[in-house]
Amino acid sequence: MVSSHLIWNIVKNNNAYLMKADNIKKWFSKEPGNLPNLASFKYSGLIHSKTIHIQPTADNKGFACVTKRATKKVSF
């Protein structure tokens, strides 16, 4: 299994969810599972195995909490 710190060092400056601008000091991120939308290791939904994502329901009358769980590796 690859370390989450190694994955963060690979994707922290270049991923599809980053929102960069010249006039802001801290970059923002639109990735699922990143509730405060800050591009940092602590809040990254890409690298952590336990995250929560809030999305609207299909009828737009409420919201649903979607969790990401770690997958168990099985070797044969």
Image (spheres, helix red, strand yellow):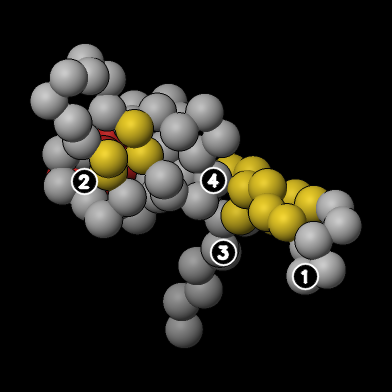
In x, y percent, where is residue 59? 83, 68
* Numbered disc 2: secondary structure: helix
Q: In this view, does 54 lie above or below 28?
A: below
Comes first in the chain, label 3 or label 4: 4
Taking 29 as reference, is 5 left or right? left
Identify the amino acid type marked 2. Val
Residue closest to the far bottom = 76
The quadrant where residue 71 appears: bottom right
Quadrant holding the N terminus: bottom left
Q: Is residue 7 above or below residue 66?
A: above
Q: Mark 1 points at which residue?
A: 58
In x, y percent, where is residue 2? 29, 51
Comes first in the chain, label 1 or label 2: 2
**Closer to the camera in the image, 20 or 9:** 20
Specify few, some or many for label 2: CA neighbours under 10 Å numbering under 14, 14-19, or 20 or more. Answer: few
Q: Identify the residue at horizontal 87%, vertical 57% (top origin).
A: 61
Comes first in the chain, label 3 or label 1: 1
Mark 1 vs mark 2, foreground winner is 1
Report the number of discs.
4
Specify few, some or many for label 1: CA neighbours under 10 Å numbering under 14, 14-19, or 20 or more. Answer: few
Task: Point out which mark residue 33 bears.
Answer: 4
* Numbered disc 4: secondary structure: loop
Q: Distance between the residues labelled 3 and 4?
A: 20 Å
Q: Name the residue under label 3.
A: 72
